[in-house]
Image (cartoon, helix red, strand yellow):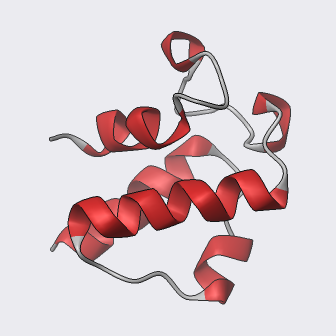
Amino acid sequence: MESLEIVKNALKDRVDIEAIKLEDKLDDLGLDSLDLVEAMLKIEEVLHVEFTSDEIVSLKIVKDLVNLIESKKS
């Protein structure tokens, strides 16, 4: 599964996933910190990886999240 699809699946209960673009700011999608943490937990379960708090806090746009996922998949 491609990383953007993983992000969309993790966010599908919170935002309109069809409208998600790589350059979208996570804040502009209407995600609060709890939403982001819950989405990250879903991604961790799917990929069997762990994200640090610092990694999660540093995420600003969807592309940051996709890049982080790519780095964990390698």
Q: Give percent across and percent down for residue 74.
A: 15, 74
Name the residue rendered at 26%, 59% in the picture.
46
Residue at horizontal 36 percent and vertical 37 percent from the top: 4
Q: Specify the quadrant of the image occupied by residue 2.
A: top left
Compared to residue 14, the image places residue 16 above or below, namely above
Q: Quadrant of the N terminus?
A: top left
Q: Position of residue 14 (x, y in %)?
A: 66, 31
Left or right of 4, for residue 12: right
- Figure quadrant of residue 64: bottom right
* Residue at far top of view: 18
Q: Is residue 71 left or right of residue 40?
A: left
Camera-side residue of 25 and 12: 12
Q: Is residue 19 left or right of residue 45?
A: right
In the image, is 37 to the left or to the right of 71?
right
Q: Is residue 1 above or below residue 45?
A: above
Residue at 62% in and 33% down: 23
Vertical order, 65 against 18 (above or below): below
Residue drawn at x 23%, y 65% is 47
Q: Position of residue 24 (x, y in %)?
A: 67, 31
Report the label total: 0
